[in-house]
Amino acid sequence: GIRGGGGADNADNTMSAPLMTSDKAPLVINGKTYHIFQASPPHTASTVLNNFLIGMFEPGAEYSFMIHNKERTIRRHDKDVAIDDGHIVTKTHILDLMGLYKQYRNTFDEVLFVVANRGVNPETRIDSSMCQYNNVLCIEYEELLYSDDHGREMVVRGLAAKLKDRFDYFFGDHLDLMDRFRLNNAVTRLQQMDQATISMADQPFTVSDNTFGVHGGHRNRDGSEMREGKSESGKLFYCGGAPGLNRKEFKYSTFGLFLANTLFPEFEGKVEYQPGQPLINSAIPLTDDTLNQATSNDILIMHSHQKCEILSLAAFPGRQLHVNAEFYDMHPLHILNPTGEFTHNYLPPGERSFIIGPHEDTPRSIRIPYCSMKLWYLHKTRPAEAILSKIIDPSEKPQNTKEHFLLYINSHYIEYRERAARALSEIGTIHTAGKCQGNWEAQPPQKPDGSPEQCEPFEDNLRPPSILPVSASSDRDTQGHNSNLFSKYRFALVMENADAPGYVSEKILDAFLAGSIPVYFGSRMVFDVFNPKAFVFFDLDIPQQALNQIQFLEQNPSEYEQMLNEPIIANEEVLEKYFSWDETVGNGVLKQRIRQMMGFQGSGASPQW
């Protein structure tokens, strides 16, 4: 090819190397092999971008998609394929560009990334620092939009010019990206994609086209509906106050809205957060005043163990999703709890009310451990930290510094936790970062509602020398999370407040995110959620078993390393069942289960052009 010069207007005067077609020959330029990742968040017009790239480099090829799972499986025509089978462009919603580069830089001479970004929401943008690398081209959503044939051609020319400018270092004189045949191939590819989309308009969203990667039920480019009937989308309402249920003044929690925005993207009411920035929330808090605005098309997100200003939620006309982040349904002091006891497996009244949490699976409830909800919340509120990849991708699993033996962080007295800490202090020096120090004999009286009082620390002159209090404030991150604290310890004692069916809290998650091996007690459901080879289960019936295992790991560093390097998530089935909140993880199986339970069809996503 001839480099540079006149762009698309004088492309007739240039010739390029023959275009790659569906025989899946690798992209080889000047003796080097190339692979292009179209790596973008969902809902950023990434399908347009992907088909443009295929049209430019392999116009007859089928759509290839890398799934966000441990194996980073690539699917084409419902079959698994290898990254080096000859296809040139791979689409993915995996946004860890550095991780992808490290994984495949030995497979190809050059690995390039083309990314679509949209708006300011961190859910639809990658970290801006990644756009500075010379093998990364970032495209804005608006640059991918068109409504007619002329607009389509202009989009192709504009994208080709950006490709040429950004990747000139790699392609140089050896590949002319403004060649008219190449541009025509890209235009034709997008025309065919649009025709496929129109032909599938009346199909369910779950029906997809293997060549272009489009789904049934998409909308037209002018936003008009292409499927039968009208969208049921409405507005998101929310309620459920923070702890302190007897207070007159309280604030509703926004925790469940981060889940709801993923589950119901077609509904109005977005919540956005970036560290260091004020929370942006357009969802509607449910009050006596706002109740009048609600319709049967709306959804209420209710934090089920907390307080809502509306005493009778039956007055809400739309669907309700109760999000239970505790091992109980309602606190004994809750105004709606007449028995004064912790309640379990409570279903909110009404056929249009549903619940997710530790509850057993029923037609109106799905058992989801709180640790899964918290992981997704952290993924959405701390996007720069690649938190999701640290849990689901073994190659990204954190490692502790091995500086200290074990850390115990608790302030509320639970006798079995205190006994476990004392026993562990006989193996090595444990550090404590709360009021609890293993002083199990100093049992405080329980509160009237049955909840635990705070621990009584040892007097300095009575504390065993193998129990050492440390300051937590300097090592916690800016949001008060424990993952920074645990990162210096080989083990982390993370025992639940209760052994309740279906309840696995964020405690074990904090240890995993720090690269520390969790010493865990709680629901046996933990064995279904996390890889049993990656943590130590402290069975209260046979505590010596866990103590012997920990002592063995301390005395055998190679065995410790083996456990430390075990995947956190055992297999793809677990990923799908408990962690697939959207289509980028485990094919969105969990998201579909929740939506189907509530009577919604498809993913609710706007078309991923």
Image (cartoon, helix red, strand yellow):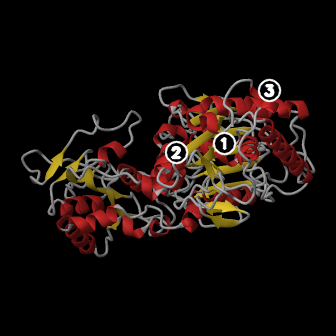
Q: Nearer the viewer, mark 1 or mark 3?
A: 3
**Mark 3 or 2, nearer chain start:** 3
Question: What residue is at 40 percent from the left and 56 percent from the top?
Answer: 508
Report the Cα–Cα distance between label 3 and label 2: 38 Å
Graded by Cα atoms within 10 Å as few (under 14), some (14 to 19) or many (20 or more), the crowding at tag 3 reads: few
Picture disc at residue 125: none
Label 1: which residue? 261
Picture quadrant of residue 206: bottom right
Label 2: which residue? 96
Q: Element type at marker 1?
A: helix
Report the Cα–Cα distance between label 1 and label 3: 47 Å
> Does 2 appear above or below 314?
above
Q: Element type at marker 2?
A: loop
Q: In the image, what residue type sits under mark 2? A: Asp
Q: In the image, what residue type sits under mark 3? A: Asn
Label 3: which residue? 10
Q: In the image, what residue type sits under mark 1? A: Asn
Please name whichever residue, 518 or 97, is drawn nearer the observer in this view of the structure: 97
Please name whichever residue, 535 or 163, is drawn nearer the observer in this view of the structure: 163
Question: What residue is at 83 percent from the left and 40 percent from the top?
Answer: 184
x and y percent of residue 159 in the render? 72, 32
Please name whichever residue, 476 or 30, is drawn nearer the observer in this view of the structure: 30
Q: Element type at marker 3?
A: helix
Contact between marks 3 and 2 (CB within 8 A): the answer is no
